[in-house]
């Protein structure tokens, strides 16, 4: 009983809002505290002191028992003092708070150069107003400026050497194979549990432990979801029902030749009397020792200007040249277990038949695995706003790049996503009374990847594509609505993880390592991409590249087939050559600076970092083939994909943005300053391990 009293008391005092902060002594809460202490004292007297006294009276004489009363009373006072110290005077996590609410809005890849240009042109009036009344500055990004690395640094306030995320992709030193940094699977088969690679405490864990109401919606690398004091919906990192992070399927009656890498995305179907019978591909499972796809039957009836899709006896209609509403599929795993997924289709053509299907998402009302906390929050949210995309990166960039969907169709999906996110935001904002609410919009990143205009290798002038400008304008309208509904007790922070630049030339780093004597191949691969290092002679290889900015030394005792003993010498040799690497076509240096991991990271996980982190100059980026341990014939090739913009360069060139409704006494800030600022604003003691500093001081 006493324990419950103390727990309830601590919960009440765990969060003190600005209305009471700094006025506790003599304030309205003090009589309550004294009342609780009196109650505790009475509890001790009644249930501990009096029974002990009666027991002493029975077993001891009158003189002895009189002598014991005073020591017992002193012991009681000491116990009460200890309780008081633990509850009130101990090392409390919550001290005087400065704000009742902290609203954090993330806009992935919001670029300070574009923002400044559009503000000066009068196209972002609300951002300009906020910058004038409060603060607007560049936000130094992470090494390297990858979204998982940067958002984790923002969340934790520490450098990658402490939080353990260094690239989109990490390597397994035992196999040299790529592993995604976004999520860690225990067995690699659908249905298994996932774990996070993040080793530092994000701000939402700290605020929750301090008893502060905390809501987190679609923050990258927040999967799997953890227990917080509020609602959490995971963002980038949530897989589809297959365990993948992206992937469309294209159904057609057309004759399709050899499509190479696209072959697993294309389903050729036959039409008979306006009826097509086919299957939807769901999760994978192990049967009779083999990994197989679980499928759901799908019947398609073709009409004059539409199609009816029948799954599990339910009919869904889709109009020609439109996206469908959400379609639910049931995948029967075994006699007792079924998995549900949701997807949308775009009906491209009826003759010949062409239909595009998004990745099959985890159904938020019947989730294959938890994607939210509480676990039922994803379902409650769907019941309030309707079904929604749950995939961490749901934008159909692959389909657009492969010319399966048009620009207009792609942008319509972006609009649908933004509408969903808006509903999510305002639903939670309506209930946001105190604590911290953090929400991330991330379609901004994908829009800029697809529609980046500026060519830094050709022209230094900044041009902004109308699609990009329109997205920024929509966010300006959204900001105006937010500003109308917050007060002086709310600290507003708008942040981005990085900025943007052009991607004009692709760098085949493994080919460069071969040409410079650091890697040896067992055969001449010519035009073969040879992913996963399949033709590398590890007995003669000193270094290899995997991921988007990373080089690893083939170190003896660390890598399974390591041969290098003098790591420092090889690192020095590679860095010296990289920093003199010149593009013969443009005459420009490819690399601004190559960084030793020890020079930019500190912490317990530096040993897990790449040995060298490459800071490319704007216009250059690692090739797609290098990311998965592959090659191209030439070291440098022109980027001919629609993916024209990127940020995987030296972080000095792509800082993010920071806006606030208060003026900071600083000209610039770092991502690692965001978390301590959130904690400081809410009166939470900033943990010593945090690298950043509060911007409020």
Image (tube, grey):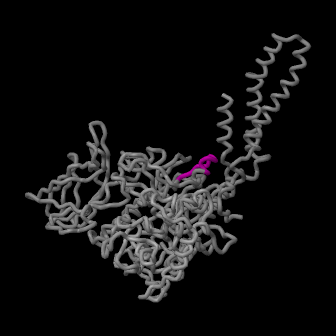
Q: Judge by depth and name the residue closer to the eye, 285 or 131.
A: 285
Q: Pick out the residue farthest to the right.
A: 63
The residues colored magenta run 206-215
Task: Using the image as rendered, state which of residue 31 and residue 109 is in the foreground.
Answer: 109
Number of numbered labels in the structure image = 0
| Residue 207 belongs to the span the image colors magenta | yes
Residue drawn at the location 48% of the way across and 72% of the way down:
648
Q: Please state if 390 lies on the left or on the right of 277 as rendered.
A: right
Tell me, yes or no, whether the highlighted magenta stretch contains residue 33: no
> Would you identify the image quadrant in which residue 36 lies?
top right
User: Relative to residue 87, is residue 309 depicted above or below?
Assistant: below
Q: Quadrant of the N terminus?
A: top right
Residue shown at the point (64%, 73%) measured from the top left: 668
Where in the figure is residue 408, as x and y percent of width and height?
31, 72
The reply, left or right, for residue 681 in relation to residue 80 is left
Q: Identify the image quadrant of residue 162.
A: bottom right
Image: 433 above or below 45 = below
Looking at the rendering, in which quadrant would you find the C terminus? bottom right
Q: Where is residue 543 drawn, in percent x and y? A: 47, 69
Residue 176 in the image: above or below residue 27:
below
397 vs 125, nearest the viewer:
397
Can you tell which quarter of the image residue 346 is in? Answer: bottom left
Q: Can the viewer see residue 107 in this picture?
A: no
The vertical placement of 528 against 426, above or below, is below
Taking the image as shown, residue 486 lies to the left or right of residue 507, namely: right
Please state the horizontal and vertical placement of residue 491, each as a whole percent of the image: 62, 61
Please state which of residues 135 and 571 is positioned toward the viewer in this rendering.
Answer: 571
């Amino acid at each position: 009983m006493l324990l419950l009293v103390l727990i309830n008391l601590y919960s009440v005092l765990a969060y003190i809002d600005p209305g009471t902060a700094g006025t506790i002594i003599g304030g309205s809460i003090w009589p309550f505290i004294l009342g609780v202490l009196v109650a505790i004292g009475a509890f001790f007297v009644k249930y501990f002191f009096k029974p002990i006294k009666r027991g002493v009276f029975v077993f001891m004489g009158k003189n002895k028992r009189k002598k014991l009363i005073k020591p017992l009373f002193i012991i009681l006072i000491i116990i009460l003092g200890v309780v008081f110290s633990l509850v009130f005077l101990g090392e409390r996590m919550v001290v005087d708070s400065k704000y009742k609410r902290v609203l954090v809005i993330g806009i992935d890849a919001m670029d300070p150069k574009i923002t400044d240009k559009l503000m000066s042109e009068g196209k972002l009036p609300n951002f300009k107003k906020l910058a004038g009344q409060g603060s607007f500055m560049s936000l130094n990004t992470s090494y390297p400026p990858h979204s998982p690395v940067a958002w984790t640094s923002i969340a934790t306030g520490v450098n990658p050497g402490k939080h353990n995320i260094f690239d989109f992709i990490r390597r397994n030193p035992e196999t040299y194979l790529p592993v995604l940094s976004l999520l860690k699977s225990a067995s690699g088969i659908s249905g298994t549990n996932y774990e996070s690679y993040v080793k530092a405490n994000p701000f939402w864990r700290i605020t929750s432990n301090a008893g502060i109401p905390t809501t987190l919606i679609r923050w990258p690398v927040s999967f799997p979801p953890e227990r917080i004091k509020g609602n959490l919906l995971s963002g980038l990192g949530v897989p589809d029902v297959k365990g993948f992070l992206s992937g469309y399927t294209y159904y057609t009656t057309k004759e399709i030749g050899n499509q190479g890498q696209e072959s697993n995305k294309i389903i050729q179907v036959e039409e008979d009397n306006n009826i097509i019978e086919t299957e939807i591909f769901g999760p994978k499972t192990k049967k009779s020792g083999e990994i197989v796809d679980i499928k759901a039957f799908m019947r398609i009836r073709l009409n004059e200007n539409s199609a009816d899709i029948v799954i599990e006896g339910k009919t869904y209609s889709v109009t020609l040249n439109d996206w469908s509403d959400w379609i639910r599929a049931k995948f029967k795993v075994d006699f007792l277990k079924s998995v549900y997924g949701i997807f949308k289709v775009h009906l491209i053509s009826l003759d010949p038949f062409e239909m595009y299907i998004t990745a099959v998402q985890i159904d938020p009302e019947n989730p294959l695995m938890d994607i939210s906390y509480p676990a039922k929050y994803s379902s409650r949210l769907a019941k309030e706003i309707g079904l929604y995309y749950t995939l961490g990166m749901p934008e159909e960039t692959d389909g657009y790049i492969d010319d399966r969907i048009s620009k207009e169709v792609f942008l319509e999906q972006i609009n649908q996503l933004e509408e969903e996110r808006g509903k999510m935001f305002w639903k939670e904002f309506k209930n946001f009374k105190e604590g911290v609410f953090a929400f991330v919009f991330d379609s901004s990143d994908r829009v800029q990847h697809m529609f980046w205009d500026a060519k830094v290798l050709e022209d230094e002038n900044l041009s902004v594509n109308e699609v990009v400008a329109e997205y920024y304008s929509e966010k300006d309208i959204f900001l105006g609505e937010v500003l109308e509904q917050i007060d002086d007790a709310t600290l507003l922070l708008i942040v981005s993880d990085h900025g943007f630049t052009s991607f004009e030339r692709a760098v085949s780093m493994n080919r460069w390592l071969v040409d410079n004597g650091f890697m040896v191949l067992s055969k001449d691969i010519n035009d073969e991409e040879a992913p996963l290092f399949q033709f590398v002679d590890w007995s003669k290889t000193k270094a290899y590249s995997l991921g988007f900015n990373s080089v690893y030394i083939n170190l003896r005792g660390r890598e399974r087939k390591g041969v290098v003993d003098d790591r420092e010498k090889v690192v020095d040799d590679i860095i010296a050559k990289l920093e003199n690497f010149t593009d013969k076509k443009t005459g420009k240096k490819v690399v601004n600076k190559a960084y030793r991991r020890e020079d930019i990271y500190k912490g317990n996980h530096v040993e897990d970092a790449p040995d060298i982190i490459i800071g490319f100059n704007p216009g250059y980026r690692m090739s797609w083939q290098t990311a998965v341990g592959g090659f191209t014939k030439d070291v440098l090739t022109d980027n001919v994909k629609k993916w024209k913009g990127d940020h995987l360069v030296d972080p000095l060139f792509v800082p993010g943005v920071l806006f606030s409704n208060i003026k900071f006494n600083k000209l610039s800030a770092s991502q690692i300053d965001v978390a301590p600022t959130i904690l400081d604003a809410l009166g939470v003691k900033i943990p010593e391990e945090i690298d950043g500093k509060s911007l409020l001081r």
